[in-house]
Image: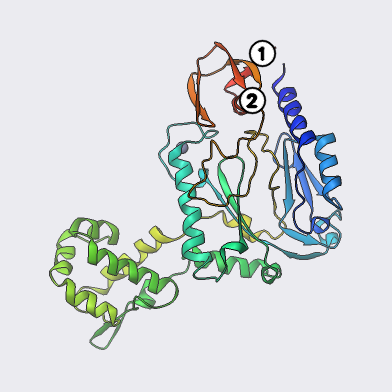
Amino acid sequence: MEKIEFIRDTLRKYYDSHTVPAPPSIERREFGAGNDKKIDWRHMSFPAEQQLNAYLRSETPLYISYSAGYYEFPEGRPMPKKNWLGADLVFDLDADEYEVDCSHSKDLVCDKCMNRVKEECIKLIEEFLIPDFGFAHDDLHVVFSGNRGYHIHIRREDVHGLSQNARKEILDFITASGLKPARHIRRRGKHLLGPRPDDWGWPGRITRAIVDEIGTGNEKSIARRMGMSTSTAKKILAKKGLVLGGIGQGDWDQVNLDPKTWRRAFGLLAIEMNAEVDKGVTMDVSRLMRLPNSIHGGTGFIACEVPSLDKFVYYNDPVVLGDGDVRCIARATMDVVLKDKVFELEEEKQLALPEYAAFYCAAKGLVSIWG
Ligand SMILES: [Zn+2]
């Protein structure tokens, strides 16, 4: 059987027996879908859940997305004819954005890269969106993309009107773009002044990290994280009490360091602590995002809302397809773990896989469907 036939049959069977809930304000959203690419066509709209599901059952695209934006005429084209009314604030974090030394091909994932993207997502939420921007957990809809990452949708009405520039400012803040250490660590007369740990935003955040590192680190870790020599780190540690007491008051002069040393530490810690997201997605107020609760045609995983990132297991929780046997021929030799089971593929060997594993492996080119 051709791979595409198997994939489409399996998706159709799924959509025939499940209802994909409509996103909020479905009648104001633009939809796009695709088979070869994620979006091969767009400018579609559905008045209600029923029509959306009828479409999934009859056309069964491999990928379906909906707009972060709200429009008066979501089908209108070109774009200005839609009359944009606002947009959710969205963030996209994808495993292939991060430098992680994985040994697999770009198409696959492993614990290392998936843990990294999860950590970034938790950082974005816990260190920025909630404390700095004042969102509540309930405002943040975290959705597994169905493949390698997460999307965060914020649908609160007060974000709808944010312009592209306002969204860029939010990104500049969370990525620490434009942070100028020389502005925060500065000489005034004989004194070297700097932020205090309880200051708001980045200056306070970095100062707290410096206080923490000096308080609990050793000369090696201080040297590495703050980009200074171990002898400088030693000097700081020898006067630890004085240095920490000084910084607590905004006085950074207790060890007589060149201000550049502190500024370098500031810059390095900003890079370490910022959140990396795909900026293009957040700034694009007409972006199409994978429709939550649809199936990702490249994995067979459901793009599901994630109630607890800590507990989410990317190779178990989004597996929703059936488990009837599908006969396959392996095209690679490797182990694939899904639903806590290990499937041992051996190139050219026949094997029977449960439908969800056959879908995943066929979509990734690891098996051919046989018979
Ligand atoms: Zn990996």
Say what secondary structure mark 1 lies in: loop
Provide residue 233's location: percent of width, then percent of height: 18, 63
Left of 367 or right of it: where is 237? left
Q: Quadrant of residue 187?
A: bottom left
- Neighbor class of circle 2 (other Cα within 10 Å; few <14, some 14-19, many 20+) is few
Q: Quadrant of the N terminus?
A: top right
Decide: is 34 above or below 178. Answer: above
Give me the disc on residue 370.
1
Whether disc 1's CB lies below 8 Å from ligand 1 is answered no
Q: Which residue is mark 2?
A: 323
Left of 362 or right of it: where is 36? right
Please tell me which residue is depicted at 71% across the width and 57% down the height of the picture.
68
Please tell me which residue is depicted at 76% across the width and 30% down the height of the picture.
13
Please tell me which residue is depicted at 55% across the width and 11% down the height of the picture.
348
Instruction: Note whether residue 99 is visible.
Output: yes
Q: How many marks?
A: 2
Say what secondary structure mark 2 lies in: loop
Label 2 – label 1 distance at C-alpha:
17 Å
Instruction: Note whether residue 252 is visible.
Output: no
Closest to the observer: 353 or 227?
353
**Hey, which residue is sitting farthest left in the picture?**
238
Which amino acid type corresponds to the residue marked 1 in the rendered image? Trp
Which amino acid type corresponds to the residue marked 2 in the rendered image? Asp
